[in-house]
Amino acid sequence: MEAYCMKCRTKREMKDVQAVTMKNGKPATQGVCPVCGTKMFRIGRSTEQVNKSTEQVNKSGPNMRIYVGNLSYEVTEEELRQEFAAFGEVTSVTIITDKYTGRPKGFGFVEMASVSEGQAAIAGLNGKTLKDRALNVDAARPRSDSREGRSYGERRGGGFG
């Protein structure tokens, strides 16, 4: 089930989907963004609709998220998908872009359908050259909470004052 992630500023397929009731009493769907881990909501879905989509997601089994670093700025999501497809079913591919310029930041995430396929992809692609750059491939770690809770007024360092 797709929803808009406010942190990534893109529409993504939610993980860990469940039915919830909002404070105003309306039914909603709650999930987690697969890239940044932020809670996502989609308002107006009935519990039955949420349960059906959750069953479909849960039937697929555990996926494995993989970090891919040192990407050339010219690599596309489709090219990255083809590299990983040699090791098994690729569920999703995301190349992270700068939210202001839209240019790639040089890293991304690939989600494989199973842990064993993901581990095989890590072993096979770590250090492999793609468009004149040696890939850095490893299991993705959860995002740390060090960035949460800060507003622009609470930044540290720099400045004249």
Image (cartoon, rainbow, N blue to C red):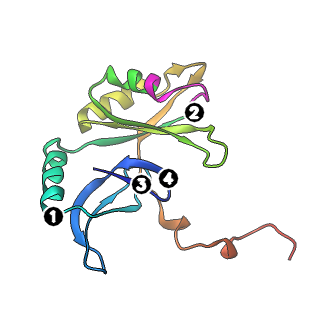
Distance between the alpha carbons at the discs numbered 3 and 2: 27 Å
Q: Nearer the viewer, mark 4 or mark 1?
A: 1
Q: Give the vertical position of 138 relative to 83 (above or below).
A: below
Say the numbered circle drawn on residue 70: 2
- The type of residue carrying mark 4 is Cys
Secondary-structure class at tag 4 = loop
Secondary-structure class at tag 1 = helix
Q: Earlier in the sequence, mark 3 or mark 2?
A: 3
- The type of residue carrying mark 3 is Tyr
Q: Which residue is mark 1?
A: 47
The residue segment tinted magenta is 71-79
Secondary-structure class at tag 3 = strand
- The type of residue carrying mark 1 is Thr
Q: Which residue is mark 4?
A: 8
Q: Nearer the viewer, mark 1 or mark 2?
A: 1
Decide: marks 4, 3 in contact (CB < 8 A)?
no
Across and down, in percent, residue 70 comes to: 57, 33
